[in-house]
Image (cartoon, rainbow, N blue to C red):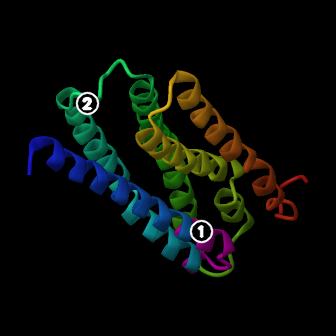
Amino acid sequence: MTGPEVALFFHILGVFLLVGASSISHLAGARLRRAETVAEARTWLGVLKLVDPLFPGAIIVIFGAGAYMVSDVAFFDWDQAWVSVALGTLIAAGALGGGFLSRGLRGVMAEAESAEEGPMPASLRRAVLNPVLFAAENVLDLWIIAIMYMMVDKPNLAGALAAVLIATAVGAASYVPASKRLEGVEGVEG
């Protein structure tokens, strides 16, 4: 295998790792939102805590292998719009996931740890159902899909930006139905 072939293997492996971690995260998040007791919430938060470190590792592998391919392979170039937009989106995804979402997850975990055993209290329910965290997770996942689209289609600047903007808008729009889940939770106005 040549260097670019090895890099492509690791690049695709990083994408699989990222998509796998994201899938597990979504499943655990869905189960967490349905949890009725503090113990159930802690179980699913434990799964999320285990998956959380996979994201930065996957992003590093994707970036490293991708950077090698762009630098080494003749038909890829740093000046291509899709490369720049995909790289910027990957960096933004790392910031959103590693900064905002990880911090939010730690807040929910702290709320769960301080809660007494038994039915889930309203304060923990509000933290679990936070529509901003839900929408941010969806934006992040749709950015991953937008990046995969760019890697396959290699669009011009307008196409690459459109993919990211559509992903952002659809992910952000998930805030609306997520905020409806808070209706009826004690201490939350509808």
Query: Which residue corresponds to mark 1?
Result: 115
- Seen from the viewer's position, the closer of residues 70 and 55 is 70
Q: Is residue 42 visible in this depiction of the protein?
A: yes
Vertical side of 78 occupied by 46: above or below: below
Residue 53 visible within the image: no
Task: State left or right for residue 177 relative to residue 144.
Answer: right
Q: Secondary structure at mark 1?
A: loop
Queried whether the magenta region covers residue 36, the answer comes back as yes
Disc 2 marks which amino acid?
Val
Q: Is 126 left, or right, of 46 in this rendering? A: right
Amino acid found under the numbered disc labelled 1? Ala
Q: Residues within 10 Å of mark 2 (few under 14, many from 20)?
A: some
The residue beneath circle 2 is 70
Q: Residue furthest top?
A: 79
Tell us which disc is closer to us: 2 or 1.
Answer: 2
What range of the chain is rendered magenta?
28-39
Q: Position of residue 183 (x, y in %)?
A: 86, 60
Where is residue 181 shown, x and y percent of the image?
80, 62
Q: Nearer the viewer, residue 169 or 47?
A: 169
Position of the C terminus, as image quadrant, is bottom right
In percent of the image, x 30 and y 44: which residue is there?
A: 62
- Give the image quarter of residue 186: bottom right
Is residue 15 found left or right of 157 in the rendered image?
Answer: left
* In the rendered image, the vertical position of residue 100 relative to residue 115, given as above or below: above
Q: Residues within 10 Å of mark 1 (few under 14, many from 20)?
A: some
Query: Residue shown at 80%/49% (left/top)?
Result: 176
Q: Which residue lies at the image location 55% right of the left edge and 70% below the top edge?
A: 27
Q: Write the residue at 57% across / 79% down.
A: 40
